[in-house]
Image (cartoon, helix red, strand yellow):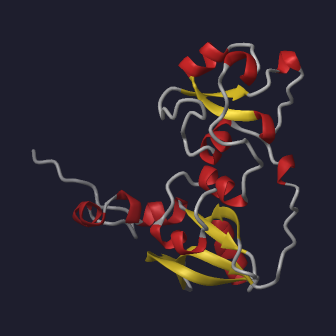
Amino acid sequence: MESTAPPAPAGSVPASERQRHGPETSPTAAIGGRVLVLNATYEPINVCTVRRAVVLLLKEKAELLERGRWELRSESSTLARPVVIRLVSYVKVPRDAHRRKITRRAVFARDSWTCQYCGSRSNLTVDHVVPRSKGGASSWENIVASCAPCNRRKGDRTPRQAGMHPRRAPHTPRAEVFIQVASPTIPAAWLQYLPQAA
């Protein structure tokens, strides 16, 4: 008895199409992807889901700047898949970025995924420049990316005691760093809206 494959669900893409377009451009990826949100001034302020972007577009709180290859369809309408949207009204963004949560990924992104002591790009950890045991704070200005060997070598000593100083003084990151953390793979369509990383 010959077995036959069940019919594909309505609206699905044949396997041949999936192979041709690849996983990043499939309708499933289009629905589950991320959208860059710009303020009315074209300043990048956030990354949101496609669903949230569509709601903002339908409520006319945002305009579509960049679209994906696939369309989003419902029973009654078709909408271009948003990739970059711009808010119609200006939203005041708090400038106290120091209150943003410090995470390992944000520290790594700010420091270009590079050990601030030796330049290595592997086996990264975070290091308190002035150790907490010596009164160092858990702040953006006192935490750097460090490879594990450098972190162990520095130990519980100050930079002066260890003779190890960060290549760049740690600082509060710009908003673009948090966009990179929210979407580690930056779509090509976003690049013109994102200033070069600090």
Q: Quadrant of residue 176?
A: bottom right
Q: Quadrant of residue 21?
A: bottom left
Query: Quadrant of the image for the C terminus?
Result: bottom right
Where residue 16 sits in the image (x, y, percent)?
22, 63
Whether residue 13 sits left or right of residue 51 in the image: it is: left
The relative height of residue 170 versus residue 198 in the rendered view (above or below) is above
Q: Residue at x 81, y 48 (%)?
A: 100
Q: Nearer the viewer, residue 138 or 27?
A: 138
Task: For residue 188, say whether it is visible.
Answer: yes
Q: Nearer the viewer, residue 188 or 147?
A: 147
* Residue at figure coordinates x 53%, y 61% from the top left: 33
Q: Is residue 60 left or right of residue 132?
A: left
Note whether residue 50 is visible: no
Residue 118 x, y percent position in the rendering: 53, 30
Q: Is residue 190 above or below residue 129?
A: below
Q: Residue at x 69, y 26 (%)?
A: 127
Q: Residue at x 73, y 51 (%)?
A: 173
Name the image quarter holding residue 113. top right
Residue 109 x, y percent position in the rendering: 60, 46
